[in-house]
């Protein structure tokens, strides 16, 4: 896709709610659109039950991601799935996208909706035991720990949601929270509190993941006493937040948190590059917000295309 005749009007990087929403709008406006995504659904596909998305009373995250996929498939929007964007370059009308398979794609406009990736603990044992009992996705790997004891590190919605999901399979779940209280939604805190399989440990700082070939335990320090304690668990799930997924983007301006700075119409600091969803500084990392921001980015891209290329 290197020739001028094969140039895209808009290339969308990311297959989460923001990216898919943007694609629907640009495609329906008649722009030559393609989606570049390693996976479809983004964080939705790794979430538990979704109850706060309008029109969806309750649906597991992977189920909602499937609904998103079916919508894209119905419209026959070109999708490059399983592809990682390694680098973007160029300028308005002449952007280049380099992917992990060595291919280069050309596009007049870009919409970055690459979402976020898990924040790491950066403690001994984490890298070595990743995918050997240490995971960043309870929905993905929870069933592997049926009738076993596991620990979740974190205290926000993602940690609470992970603990509830793991309690379905596991013998017991510990939640280690650095703070003296949870920071998630009251409804999730209430569900965790009444689940007999879940034990909460507050003021606890994880210091080491234990195990030779597979996770065998978790070492932590009590902040109030300074004592070092050990939990015997077969799995550890890290849920301490996420960071913007922008390793490929050296063009746009970011804030102090590494989020892409955007205007009200989702325009970045680079003319012709728009951004939407969790990768931006818009705040409120929610499915509904991402879908709305994606739609806005798609419409803004179309308006610019009309001015510059129609």
Image (spheres, rainbow, N blue to C red):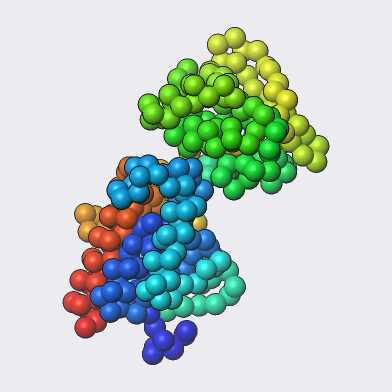
Q: Report x, y in % for residue 163.
A: 55, 32
Percent of width and height locating residue 203: 53, 18
Task: Point out the residue furthest to the right here.
Answer: 212
Q: Position of residue 77 (x, y in %)?
A: 40, 74
Decide which of 53, 102 is in the foreground and name it. Answer: 53
Residue 132: quarter of image: top right
- Taking depth in this image into account, of 305 and 238 the one nearest to the observer is 238
Where residue 223 appears, as percent x and y from the top left, is: 56, 15
Instruction: Confirm whether residue 107 shows in the render.
Output: no
Q: Indicate whether 268 appears above or below 129.
A: below
The answer to whether residue 302 is seen in the rendering is yes
Q: Residue at x 59, y 9 (%)?
A: 225
Residue drawn 68% across and 38% down? 146
Q: Is residue 14 above or below residue 47?
A: below
Question: Measuring 42% from the left and 59% from the top, which residue is drawn there?
Answer: 67
Quarter of the image with the C terminus is bottom left
**Total numbered badges shown on the rendered structure:** 0
- Residue 200 in the figure: left or right of residue 185: right
Q: Up-down: is 11 above or below 154?
A: below
Give the residue at x 46% y 49%: 61
Quarter of the figure with residue 251? bottom left
Q: Between 17 and 8, which is closer to the camera in this rendering? A: 17
Q: Nearer the viewer, residue 250 or 140?
A: 140
């Amino acid at each position: 896709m290197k020739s001028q005749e094969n140039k895209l009007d808009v290339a969308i990087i990311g297959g989460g709610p923001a990216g898919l929403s943007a694609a629907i709008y640009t495609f329906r406006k008649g722009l030559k659109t393609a989606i570049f995504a390693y996976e479809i659904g983004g964080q939705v596909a790794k979430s538990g039950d979704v109850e706060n998305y309008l029109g969806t009373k309750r649906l597991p995250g992977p189920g909602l991601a499937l609904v998103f996929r079916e919508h894209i498939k119905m419209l026959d929007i070109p999708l490059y799935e399983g592809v990682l964007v390694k680098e973007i370059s160029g300028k308005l009308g002449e952007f280049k996208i380099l992917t992990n398979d060595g291919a280069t794609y050309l596009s007049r406009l870009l919409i970055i909706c690459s979402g976020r990736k898990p924040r790491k603990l950066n403690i001994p044992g984490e890298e070595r035991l990743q995918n050997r009992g240490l995971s960043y996705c309870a929905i993905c790997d929870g069933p592997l720990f049926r009738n076993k004891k596991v620990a979740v590190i974190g205290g926000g919605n993602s940690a609470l949601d992970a603990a509830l999901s793991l309690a379905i399979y596991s013998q017991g779940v510990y939640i280690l929270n650095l703070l003296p209280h949870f920071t998630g939604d009251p409804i999730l805190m209430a569900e965790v509190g009444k689940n007999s399989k879940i034990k909460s440990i507050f003021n606890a700082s994880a210091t080491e993941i234990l195990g030779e070939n597979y996770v065998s335990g978790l070492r932590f320090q009590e902040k109030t006493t300074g004592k070092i304690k050990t939990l015997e668990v077969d799995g550890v799930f890290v849920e301490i937040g996420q960071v913007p997924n922008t390793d490929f983007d050296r063009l746009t301006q970011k804030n102090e948190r590494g989020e892409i700075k955007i205007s009200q119409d989702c325009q970045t600091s680079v003319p012709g590059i728009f951004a939407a969803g969790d990768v931006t500084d818009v705040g409120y990392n929610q499915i509904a917000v991402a879908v709305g921001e994606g739609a806005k980015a798609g419409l803004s891209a179309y308006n610019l295309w009309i001015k510059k290329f129609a």
